[in-house]
Amino acid sequence: MKFTVADLLDQLSSSDALPLARLEKALGLTTKTEKALLAISVQPLIRLGVLEEEEGGLRRQENPELIAARLRCSSKGFCFALRDDGGEDIYIRDHQLNHAWNGDRVLVRVTREGGRRRSPEGAVQCILARKTRSLLAQLERRDDDAVVAVPLDDRLLTTIALGATEAAEEVDEAGDSVVEVAIDRFPVGQFGALGHVARRLPVRGGQEADRDLLLTKHHLHDQPAAPRATLKSPEAKGRTDLTALTVLLPVGWQAAEAPPLPGLSLERLEGGGWRLWVHAPTVGERVPAGSSLDTWLAQQGEAICSGNQWLPLLTPALTKAAALLPGEKGEAVSVALDLAADGSLEHFRFCPSTVLPTAQLDAAALTALAERKPRARTVPAALKPLKDQLGLLEDLQTVAALLRSRRLAGGSLDLDLALPAIDSLADLRIPAPDAPRDGWLVQLDPGQPLGLLREAVLLAGRALGRHLAALQLPGLFAAQPTPDPEALNEVAKSALSLEIPLELSPEGNADAAELAAAFAATDRSRPLQQQLRDALRAVELGDQPQPHALAGEEQAYAPWCCAALHYADLWNQRLLLTLLSEGKDRPSVRHKSGVDLASDSCHGTTDWSLLTAAQLAPFKEDRAHGLAKRLNGRSRFVQDVQADVVAMAQARYAEPLVGQTLPGVISGVQSYGFFVEVPPSQVEGLVHVSSLKDDWYEYRSRQNRLVGRKGRRTYMVGDSVAVEIQKVDALRHQIDLAVIQPDDGGPAAEDGGEAEESDLALTTA
């Protein structure tokens, strides 16, 4: 089918009915069969109360009893629906899944309200969109000689029956390959899932084969090609000539397909302040809104880094046209950010511009600058292309440090949780310079060029967010709410059980920034920061201005500088350019002077429509049809892909270490055992409680530790342990570990009185 229920609902509004013919056109349905499938799909949605049929067509019906969510299942059979609105997760029993699978977007009806210690329960009423249309599996021959596909992802609680042509398929007993299974029929009624083998993939074929496995797993190996399109040329009229400015291009990524990034300039102002310029490659100006290329880019959503290669968002032609290069004039969208001496933002002004980049700024240059003696007469080789800009570089570092300090004071978090130094991760180890979906930022080394760019880009996003909010324009705003106090308090309890001193609010609540500072000063910093990371809320795109804690912004944040990385930036960039080129700067032609719509000086001075209804229509239509929701979903998908890239690289790193004993650190404790991170790859494996043969261990949830009843040996977060790597399953990213216990019985726990009742005591046979 060419469309999902989610696609159908995105085309409809709850206010105006849409004629069926227009809906067919919007969904790209041309044949009688496709249109008949649409008619079949509509009827159950009407009965369910999701759609309403009127004389003028179809209208979406708001039904508060039906909750949009995404399924998250475990290999143990537990399933929860994660609500789109951020509400409490809903527990779904297996008989209430109605054939939905892990990752599917669904509509859920609550069947039992939650209690103090119990999640609400619900049932899946409708599957909005299937996540899995093909999967990696191993073939298994059953007793009746039938061959079925068993998904590698054990969260997919099903098997796939294969068609008759697959009956003679050779089962790989050695496990040297897996198969890609395409789903021909999802389970419906009494009929199970049916599929066919699309191809075999080697398990031990090297780095390129691993990349193919991951791309296949996430359905990225056969993406549709970009449509042929003629790019628009940027308007020469109205561009500000900034070619006299010194423009440096920070470089962090090395892969050939890496997305182009903005450039930076800096000027000193009277009074001790600075004017920081951000020059973003103009992408939105080159892609017509609503064109086939624009639609394709919106579907791609983001550029994806798979380690040493990229799946770019932009087409090669668009990348070549937009990229800023040293010594070549290029078109950009620039913003001048006027800063006070303390780094606070005082004024800003946007403009379409022409720039002439001076040089690239890489990590080698910043490292050489840091190591250079203050009065040295010689210039290191890495700094020679920048020898005339050494003062500018030092000023940029000063300004970036001021901006970072103010950002952290505004609620942002930098955590020392960089990815491990594994060669195959390559560009993925260098975080993007904008605010990620995660609610935290990787602590960047001062010698990283993208660390300088990050502070400028975040400030530029704050400026546009405020500008669009003040002018009441329909932007895509990114928001990150403050963390849930209960989640932070759980992290604080874990730290207090380790006797880490903490300062709490008068209400007894923990603060994320204070927790981060306290953890950084301990020898258990990494595992505690990981717990804090998991308690933070994600960044989401939306239609309304909201605070963005990660950027230190209290009003509104609108991303626009990294249009080669995210479609949301491209979309906001296009809205900004529309305002700059077509905005109405005065109420009528009778007024001789107008306001400067490019600057914050116009805030509070406009009481007329800045853009016509026709100019605003494509932006409002995109927002009404769920663009933000789709881009949020794509962002989560990209996050999953890149997490799998890291897990695969770590597992491959660990494979040659099977049988070896290595030092590790306990990163988490549960009733069934504890997890251990093994440096330098930071691969994480499980030590199951059943492997602890020396005692009978019980889990103390309040102290977050395992305690032996006889020997009083304890295992808690941050403890150093020696472990043996027993088994590595690279395909499932599972590492089995066994702890090596010292002969002397080890340290004893401090009981502090009677032992509390454990949540669960597991004996080791």
Image (spheres, rainbow, N blue to C red):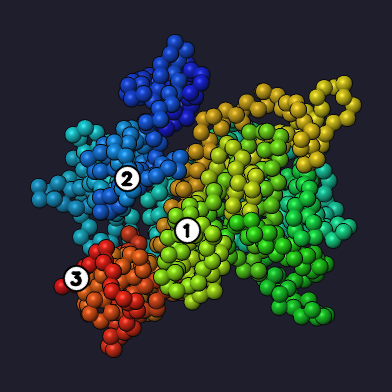
Q: Earlier in the sequence, mark 1 or mark 3?
A: 1
Say whether residue 141 is left or right of residue 125.
Answer: left
Specify few, some or many for label 2: CA neighbours under 10 Å numbering under 14, 14-19, or 20 or more: few
In the rendered view, tell whether residue 456 sits above or below residue 664.
above
Residue 291's place in the image compared with 420, above or below, is above
Horizontal side of 600 relative to 495 (left or right) equals right
Residue pictured at 86% horizontal, 57% vertical: 269
Residue type of the residue flagged with mark 2: Gly
Residue 340 placed where, x, y %? Answer: 79, 56
Residue denoted by label 1: 488
Disc 1 from disc 3: Cα separation: 32 Å
Q: Amino acid at mark 3?
A: Thr
Mark 1 or 2, closer to the camera: 2
Camera-nearest residue between 185 and 546: 546
Q: CA distance from mark 3 to mark 2?
A: 31 Å
Amino acid type for the residue under numbered disc 1: Leu
- Residue sitting at x 44%, y 24%: 60
- Residue 763 has which mark? 3
Q: Which residue is mark 2?
A: 115
Near-viewer residue (632 or 421): 632
Residue 287: percent from the left, percent from the top? 64, 36
**Residue at the image point whose x is 69% and y is 42% from the top:** 466
Please identify the quarter of the rendering in which residue 410 is found.
bottom right
Q: Residue furthest top?
A: 55
**On the image, which quarter does residue 611 sit in?**
top right
Q: Which circle, 3 or 2, is nearer the viewer? A: 2
Q: Is residue 412 above or below residue 761?
A: above
Quadrant (top left/top right/bottom left/bottom right) for the C terminus: bottom left
For the point 31% across and 32% down, which residue is it? 125
Residue 328 in sight from this viewpoint = no
